[in-house]
Amino acid sequence: MAIRKGKKGLLAGLVLAFLFALFLSSRPAQAATYTVQRGDTLYLIGQRYNIGAWELQIINGLPDTWIYPGQVLWIPDVPGRVHVVSPGDTLFLIGQWYGVPYQDIMWVNGLSGSYIYPGQALWIPAAGKTAASPAASRGSTASRGGISYSAQDVDLLARLVYAEARGEPYAGQVAVAAVVLNRVRDGRFPNTIAGVIYEPYAFECVSNGQIWLQPNTTAYQAARDALAGKDPSGGALFFWNPVTATSPWVWTRQIITVIGNHVFAI
């Protein structure tokens, strides 16, 4: 009986979250990212950008309302609302419900494929408003720190973080993403995110196929934090796990920091 009640309670919670998302009013967003300052709360940040605290929490994958100075939050840059995916949902059906092309939902959320899962939070752009979003137009890019990137690049970077560093401390996941961006800026490597990640023999997850695993929200947040300028690696160009590394060459590099199970070097 206790198990049945638990399941019913979970289902009721999902349904409640779904219904609440459906009735959220459209809210204009005005920035791509926001770095949390001392004294900030989700409520105060939401007031500043005219977006609900609950929406900020859900769309950033936060388990609760706790935030800390220096944390980078994603602020949707087109008017819209949160939709929490329910069992049976597809991007096509969600798009039909809100009167928005499903491709626009994919672009705003940085999705490279149509796979979604129950409990996932999606930002649904208001009908006809995706032209205001740099991620919503096909082929368009954003630029930060001298690096131009598209929604596909954000997704690819998150995939690499998840494949190479899932289970690592959050700082270590951001550091892995930062290594990719540091290589983009270095003339000895390809000058695009995709070029760095797909460079032959650069990352094991590409050769073994783990790059195609679906990233979690933490991996996406780590990718966004790195793109926003966070670099816990201290400018590293290489990282490896000393327990599993098989190449003696990596030990010729100058080690600058260790985060979790990864060594970072230049």
Image (spheres, rainbow, N blue to C red):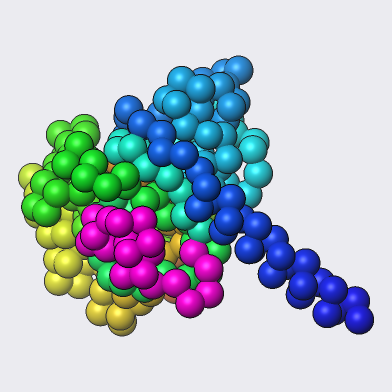
Label tally:
0
Can residue 239 be spotted in the picture? Answer: no
| 103 relative to 170 in the view: left or right | left
Could you say where residue 210 lies in the image, as x and y percent from the top left? 35, 76
Residue in the image at 51% along x and 39% along y: 56
- Quarter assignment of residue 235: top left
Could you say where residue 174 lies in the image, as x and y percent from the top left? 41, 47
Query: Is 110 in front, or is 228?
Result: 110
| 248 relative to 83 in the view: left or right | left
Question: Is 248 drawn above or below residue 81 in the view shown?
Answer: below
Residue in the image at 16% along x and 42% along y: 131
| 257 relative to 151 in the view: left or right | right
User: Is 215 covered by the magenta stretch?
Assistant: no
Could you say where residue 26 lies in the image, as x and y percent from the top left? 41, 38
Residue in the image at 51% along x and 58% along y: 84
Query: Is 80 in front, or is 222?
Result: 80
Query: Is 82 in front, or is 116?
Result: 82
Query: Is 55 in front, or is 256?
Result: 55
Question: Is 31 drawn above or below residue 109 in the view shown?
Answer: above
Could you say where residue 172 lies in the image, as x and y percent from the top left? 47, 50
User: Is 101 covered by the magenta stretch?
Assistant: yes
| 6 relative to 80 in the view: left or right | right
Quadrant assignment for the N terminus: bottom right
Question: Is 37 drawn above or below residue 96 in the view shown?
Answer: above
Q: What stretch is highlighted in magenta?
A: 85-104
| Residue furthest out toward the right | 1
- Quarter assignment of residue 241: bottom left
